[in-house]
């Protein structure tokens, strides 16, 4: 109830100060010819912004995955900021330096490099592993039940998370004042801020708000897994996705059922809605990185990490918080025979006597699981121009 009220309040606030929600806005001359000419000196942006409206999909909606719509002007601005290297102290690093579209907005290195080649402490998280941030993170309300950000859950809101990336000395290394000054100095931002915010003020708050809109506009719901689910659902009702899909190969269907039995208990039946939000999956007996426990100091959370969704997982190697596994085959080998009896090992990975529950897959089963994980790749998302680098 309280969060509903907050949501209503927030929407009112947003609506009352956002020019671009004006229903009478015409799309002719979205930018003035002079402004568009200025923008086009630096950026490849369409004359009228791309639409970032997301159509809810039935098989995802059943699991509560209903994205919140984002304003096109704010997302457009956020997209430019996400790719702008001048937001870092050396002018060499943008958000996209560690979150590449082709790797589902993750990185192909175990530790991404920030300013002056300083390595980040953990493996970059693929923003496209999540179908869409708004239903998953509850970012509109940021209520107490919202899923938290980072491998160790240390950020509670998207705004907090984005600020941390910008201020982190290993990442972009800029204080709020420097960021604002740097954005103000770029001529192409004036018209973009004017479209996104009434008065067009270039403030740190507005910078972070628009980057958040861009991250929230990312939507990856059109993988082969989704298409096959939708097509099967049309012929015979398949709301939970448990029966074989008609467009899958026999191997993919075999992998899907192994996934549903062994993995979906934690990673979720849509591979986008983890049922267990964090845990230890038994990587080490003695973890070096203490994860959530390192932040809150609780014994039960030592060596416990956020359980990531697995969308586009074939694109986001290496795997785990420290990128220790180079391939999906190695990941499946871990669950098959490598689970360690760490004291906080999640109970779903334990035998009744408490020992690790190795899954003992045959070679054929391992290949089937990997084939299934490949169906979670959404090519349209990985190549969509509306999410791509807009700089010339
Ligand atoms: C130097 C590399 C680097 C840069 C630059 C960077 N990130 Fe990240 N990002 C990471 C790493 C590494 C993690 C995981 C860190 C951790 O868990 O401790 C992460 C985590 C995240 C997450 C959390 C995802 C989740 O599911 O919890 C989001 C969102 C994110 N980054 C967005 C951004 C945005 C927006 C920017 C630009 C303002 C940015 N990042 C800049 C490396 C980077
Ligand atoms: C007890 C819950 C649980 C079960 C069951 C489970 N996982 Fe995980 N999985 C996790 C956690 C927690 C992590 C993050 C571990 C870390 O990085 O410290 C993870 C990480 C992963 C990753 C790496 C993700 C990334 O972005 O790097 C993959 C891939 C994966 N699991 C696949 C599977 C598969 C396939 C199965 C079934 C064979 C499975 N998991 C079963 C909890 C589980």
Image: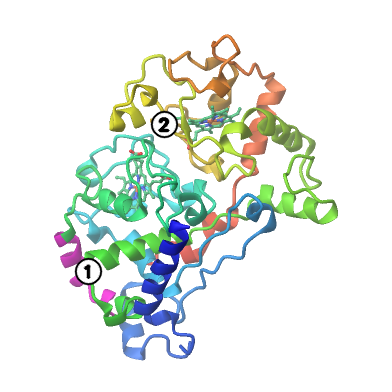
Please tell me whether residue 189 belongs to the stretch shown in magenta: yes
Residue 235 coordinates in the image, percent (x, y): 85, 54
Residue at point 57% right, 36% down? Answer: 267
Say whether residue 241 is left or right of residue 290: right
Residues at marks 1 and 2, CA–CA distance in whole angstroms: 34 Å
Q: Quadrant of residue 40?
A: bottom left
Residue 384: x percent and y percent? 52, 62
- Relative to 212, does residue 24 appear above or below in the rendering? below
In the structure shown, which secondary structural element does the residue marked by tag 2 occupy? Answer: strand
Q: Residue at x 64, y 27 (%)?
A: 262
Which residue is rendered at x = 29% and y = 38% of the image? 120
Is residue 73 located in the magenta-colored stretch of the structure?
A: no
Residue 305 tag number: 2
Which quadrant is home to the C terminus? bottom left
Q: Which residue is mark 1?
A: 203
Can the viewer see residue 391 in this picture?
no
Position of residue 101 measured from the top left corner of the image (x, y, whole percent): 46, 53
Would the CB of label 2 be found within 8 Å of ligand 2? yes
Q: Secondary structure at mark 1?
A: loop
- In the foreground, 98 or 149: 149
Give yes or no for contact between labels 1 and 2 (Cβ–Cβ under 8 Å). no
Residue density around tag 2, few if under 14, some if 14–19, many if 20 or more, within 10 Å: many
Of helix, strand and loop, which mostly describes the magenta segment? Answer: helix
**Identity of the residue furthest to the front in this view:** 1
Badge 1 density bin: few <14, some 14–19, many ≥20, Cα 10 Å: some
In primary-sequence order, the first of circles 1 and 2 is 1
> What residue lies at 73% left-to-right and 44% top-to-bottom?
241
Asked whether, in this view, residue 17 is left or right of residue 70, the answer is left
């Amino acid at each position: 109830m309280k969060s509903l009220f907050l949501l209503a309040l927030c929407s009112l606030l947003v609506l009352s100060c956002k020019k671009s929600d004006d229903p009478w806005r015409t799309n002719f001359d979205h930018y003035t010819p002079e402004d568009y000419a200025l923008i086009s000196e630096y950026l490849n942006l369409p004359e009228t912004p791309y639409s970032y409206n997301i159509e809810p999909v039935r098989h995802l909606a059943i699991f509560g995955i209903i994205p919140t719509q984002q304003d096109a002007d704010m997302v457009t601005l956020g997209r430019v900021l996400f790719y702008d290297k001048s937001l870092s102290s050396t002018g060499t690093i943008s958000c996209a330096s560690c979150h590449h579209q082709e790797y589902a907005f993750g990185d192909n290195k175990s530790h991404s490099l920030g300013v002056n080649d300083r390595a980040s402490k953990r493996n970059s998280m693929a923003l496209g592993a999540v179908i869409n941030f708004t239903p998953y993170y509850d970012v509109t309300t940021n209520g107490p039940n919202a899923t938290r950000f980072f491998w160790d859950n240390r950020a509670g809101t998207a705004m907090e998370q984005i600020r941390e990336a910008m201020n982190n000395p290993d990442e972009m290394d800029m204080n709020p004042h420097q960021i604002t000054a740097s954005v103000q100095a770029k001529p192409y931002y004036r018209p973009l801020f004017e479209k996104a915010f009434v008065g067009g003020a270039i403030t740190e708050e507005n910078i972070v708000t628009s980057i958040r809109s861009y991250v929230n506009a990312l939507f990856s719901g059109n993988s082969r897994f989704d298409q096959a689910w939708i097509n099967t659902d049309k012929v015979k009702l398949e709301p939970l996705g448990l029966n074989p899909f008609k467009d899958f190969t026999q191997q993919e269907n075999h992998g899907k059922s192994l996934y549903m039995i062994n993995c979906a208990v934690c990673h979720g039946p849509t591979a986008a809605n983890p049922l267990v939000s964090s845990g230890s999956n038994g990587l080490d007996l003695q973890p070096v990185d203490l994860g959530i426990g390192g932040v809150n100091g609780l014994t039960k959370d030592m060596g416990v990490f956020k359980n990531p969704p697995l969308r586009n997982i074939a694109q986001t190697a290496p795997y785990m918080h420290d990128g220790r596994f180079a391939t999906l085959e190695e990941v499946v080998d871990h669950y098959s025979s490598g689970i360690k009896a760490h004291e906080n090992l999640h109970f779903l990975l334990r035998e009744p006597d408490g020992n690790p529950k190795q899954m003992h897959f045959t070679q054929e089963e391992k290949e089937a699981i990997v084939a299934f994980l490949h169906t979670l790749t959404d090519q349209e998302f990985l190549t969509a121009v509306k999410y791509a680098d807009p700089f010339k």
